[in-house]
Each structure stands twice: as C-alpha cells, then as structure tokens.
Image (spheres, helix red, strand yellow):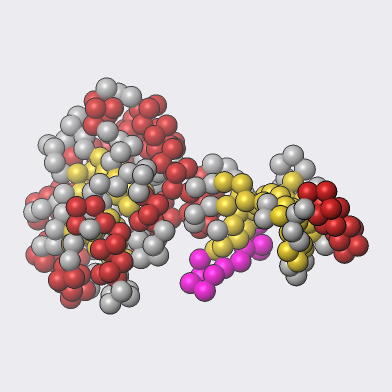
C-alpha cells in the first residue's frame, strides 16, 4: 500500500474515469500514460468497469489502475479479480474497509468530517478521500480538519479542476487529487484520445507550474562578479543582493563568484513541487544529478540540477 500511495503522491492527479464501453479502456489508458498520468480510478458506475479494469491491467501492467465507487463486497471481489491495485469508495463503510484490508488491497474511503477521520483511524487507515471536496468546504475545510490529525493525508475529489488543483496540492497533507476534467465522458465516447492526451499533458503542466525563475552568469572570480554587478547597477539601477556564492543584480539575474555548472551559467526553473517535477520530467526523458539535490525540513527536495546543458546553460529546478 505504501508504494502505491507514494507513487500516487508523485503523480499528483488521479484521473477519475467512467467507461461505458470496455473497448475504450486500452486507448484511454494509452492516452493517460502518454499524456503523463499513468494512473486511473475506474468507477463502478457502469457495467463495463470490471472488464475495463481487466483490459488496462493486462495491457498496461505498470499503470496504477484502481476501482472507484466501490460499494459492496461483490464489487471488491470484481475489482481485485480484474487487477485493481487500489480501491476508492465515496463513503466509509467499515465492513467494506475491513474486507479490503483482509484481502490486502489498499482502500481510500470517502469522508468529509472529523468523525469520518476518527472512524478511518480506528480501522488502521491513514489516507482518506475527501468527498465531495468543493461542496464540503474545499481546501479550507481540509486544513481545519488536518490540524488535530497530523498523520492523516487526503485525496480530495469533487469539483477540482485546473482553476483550483494547485490550491489543494500546495497543502502538505494532500496526497493527490482526483479529477475528471481531462477525461470527459463525451470525449471518450467520441474516441478523441488525442484530445484527452493533450488535456492530460496540460493538467500535468498546470500542476507543476513551471516558470522561469532566474539566470545565473558564471564569473572567473569575486573581482569579475563585483565588476559585473557594479556595471549593471550603474547602467540600470539594479540593486545588489549579496549571497554566499553569488550576488543577485536583480531578482532574475544572479552573478556567480566563480565558474559554476554550465559553460555560460545556469537557468533556474521554478516549480510547485520539485519531487513531482522530477517524477514527471524523468518520464519525459530528463536525467537528473541526484548529488546536487537539497532538501527541506520535511525531507522533500527543494533544488536539483538536470544533467547536461541546453544552449550552453545548466538548468536546475527550485521550489
């Protein structure tokens, strides 16, 4: 359970999908994987759910496919038999939770109040679905509830989309978010899997929030750095901000005190979550220099260099 939950936390967004025809399962899974979200919660709202999960599990064994809207023991059995790697329910039924745990299948039951959290804890769970998220008070409600329950993490679902997904993911107690905006039923029915792939890629980019942070220019030494900073200040009135190994001539322009990574210097790219960015960029073929990473007090990465150069510059991610 721990490995699956950890990977879901790195993926960040779990597409919640409703499949009416099992023939759509494989091309939909392919679109999700190629778009950057190698996971799915297939809801048991249609008769095709079990077959769809089975097709995905067999054709894409590395994909984390789960079953959602699981309400009965029979559905638990169907989901596990089909190859579901986790189960999600809209509410917390102790009988269903216990049954899943007895079968060794991770379950994330739905709650939207402290009583539900207490019930989940009494059953040995540490991760709960917060549902329906927006209608139940959104991220504000989660933050209020999380305060007395330090070890609990949440998977909010319901009313989440590009406009608010980062409001949720910016809070450390959010494991991941469930959403359906990139897997619209009408697009699935129309066979628009290229359109779905584009929406998935956009969802990933929205979540990661990449943007230019600053440019670092290499210098031969302190004297050259100081001269560059002085000249930029003289010409453009840029205020100098001295650091331990560099001076910022402006918030977007760092002058190094020596030659650092990159023939000409480095470019910093800001992201909302460095660990998630590393996970997703590696899926895009990016390699990282893990020895360069630094971490915050919680153990999460806050800085890491990409291996190699692009256009004469080294690149690093920063939170």
Residue 294 lies in the magenta-colored region: yes
Task: Tell me residue 192's x, y (percent).
Answer: 33, 24
Task: Tell me residue 99's x, y (percent).
Answer: 13, 63
Quarter assignment of residue 146: bottom left
Residue 250 as seen in the image, left or right of residue 230? left
Residue 83 as seen in the image, left or right of residue 44? right
Q: How many marks?
A: 0
Q: Residue at x 66, y 63 (%)?
A: 291
Is 99 above or below relative to 208? Answer: below
Query: Which of the pair 296/240 is nearer the observer?
Result: 240
Is 316 above or below relative to 50? Answer: below
Task: Tell me residue 157's x, y (percent).
Answer: 25, 51
Secondary structure mostly taken by the magenta-highlighted segment of the chain: strand
Is 224 above or below relative to 242? Answer: above
Q: Residue at x 44, y 37 (%)?
A: 201
**Region in magenta:** 288-300
Q: Which quarter of the image is occupied by the N terminus?
A: bottom left
Q: Which quarter of the image is occupied by the C terminus?
A: bottom right
Quarter assignment of residue 119: bottom left
Q: Residue at x 30, y 35 (%)?
A: 183
Is residue 297 visible in the rendered image? The answer is yes
Query: Which of the pair 19/158 is nearer the observer?
Result: 158
């Amino acid at each position: 359970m721990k490995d699956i939950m950890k990977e879901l936390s790195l993926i960040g967004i779990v597409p919640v999908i409703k499949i009416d025809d099992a023939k759509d399962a494989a091309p939909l899974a392919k679109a999700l994987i190629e778009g950057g979200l190698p996971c799915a919660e297939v809801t048991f709202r249609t008769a095709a759910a079990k077959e769809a999960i089975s097709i995905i599990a067999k054709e894409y064994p590395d994909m984390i496919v789960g079953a959602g809207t699981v309400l009965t023991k029979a559905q638990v059995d169907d989901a596990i038999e089909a190859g579901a790697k986790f189960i999600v329910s809209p509410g917390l039924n102790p009988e269903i939770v216990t049954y899943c745990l007895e079968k060794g299948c991770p379950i994330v039951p739905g709650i939207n109040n402290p009583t539900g959290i207490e019930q989940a804890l009494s059953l040995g769970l540490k991760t709960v679905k917060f549902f329906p998220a927006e209608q139940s008070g959104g991220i504000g409600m989660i933050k209020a509830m999380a305060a007395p329950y330090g070890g609990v993490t949440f998977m909010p679902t319901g009313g989440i989309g590009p406009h608010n997904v980062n409001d949720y993911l910016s809070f450390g107690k959010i494991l991941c978010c469930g959403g359906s905006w990139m897997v619209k039923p009408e697009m699935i029915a129309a066979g628009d899997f290229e359109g779905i792939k584009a929406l998935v890629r956009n969802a990933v980019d929205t979540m990661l929030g990449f943007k230019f942070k600053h440019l670092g220019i290499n210098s031969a030494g302190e004297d050259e750095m100081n001269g560059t900073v002085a000249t930029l200040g003289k010409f453009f009135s840029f205020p100098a901000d001295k650091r331990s190994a560099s001076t910022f001539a402006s918030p977007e322009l760092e002058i190094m005190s020596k030659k650092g990574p990159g023939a000409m210097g480095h470019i910093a790219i800001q992201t909302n979550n460095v660990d998630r960015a590393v996970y997703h960029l590696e899926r895009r073929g990016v390699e990282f220099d893990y020895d360069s990473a630094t971490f915050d007090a919680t153990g999460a990465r806050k800085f890491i260099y990409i291996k190699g150069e692009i256009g004469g510059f080294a690149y690093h991610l920063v939170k």
